Image (cartoon, rainbow, N blue to C red):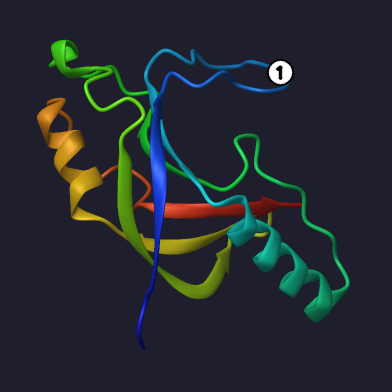
Amino acid sequence: MPNFKSFGTLRYSPKLLGEQKTSENWWLVLDCDKEIGMYYRKLHFFSCYEKLSSPAWDSHITVVRNEQPPHKQHWHKYDGKRVEFEYQHFTHTNGAYWWLDVNCQELLDIRVELGLPMNPEFPLHLSVGHS
C-alpha cells in the first residue's frame, strides 16, 4: 500500500499547553499540516460519531520526547528546517490517542546526531487526535 508524503517544520523546546508535568526543554517536534489531523478527526467522527480533540501541538511528529541529548551542541541546529516525511493512511489508537505511522530517515538521523538511540521509545508517528 502506498504511503502519502507531506512536509513539516522542526521546532525545538515547544511550549507545552495545559498542565505542565514535564520539562519542555528536551522536546523536538515536527509541526505538520493541520489539515491532516482535521481530516482524520473528521473521518473518525463520521465512522463512530465520537469527536476527537486536537493534540496539544496540533498535528505533529515527536522526534525527541523529553530526552536530554548527550550532544547538546547540536540542539537547535535544524530549528525551522522543513523536512519531508511519509505517512500511512490507517489510524492506530491505544483508546486515548490516535496516530498515523511515519517513515522519515532524516528525523532518525537527527536523533543519532544528538547522541540518542536512532529509534525512539515510541516509533515515529503523526499525532492526529485524542479522546
Say which quarter of the image contains residue 111: top left
> Relative to residue 83, is residue 77 drawn left or right?
left
Question: Does the rendering let one see residue 117?
Answer: no
* Image location of residue 121, percent across then percent down: 33, 43
Question: How many marks are shown on the rendered structure?
Answer: 1
* Residue type highlighted by circle 1: Glu
Instruction: Tell me the residue at 50%/22% (across/down).
Output: 14
Give me the residue at 53% from left, 16% from top. 22
Q: Is residue 8 left or right of residue 33?
A: left
Q: Which residue is disc 1 drawn over? A: 19
Q: Residue furthest right?
A: 49
Residue at 65% across / 35% down in the picture? 56
Percent of width and height locating residue 88 = 43, 73
- Is the residue marked by circle 1 packed among few (<14), some (14-19), or many (20+) residues within 10 Å? few
Location of residue 40 by image quarter: bottom right
Q: Position of residue 108 (x, y in %)?
A: 20, 45
Q: Residue furthest bottom?
A: 1
Taking 65 as reference, is 21 above or below it? Answer: above
The reply to whether residue 73 is visible in this rendering is yes
Image quadrant where residue 105 sits: bottom left
* Foreground pick, 36 / 54: 36
81 w.r.t. 59: above or below: above
SS label for mark 1: loop
- Quadrant for the N terminus, please: bottom left
- At 37% from the left edge and 77% from the top edge, which residue is drawn? 3
Residue 61 image point, x, y percent: 44, 46
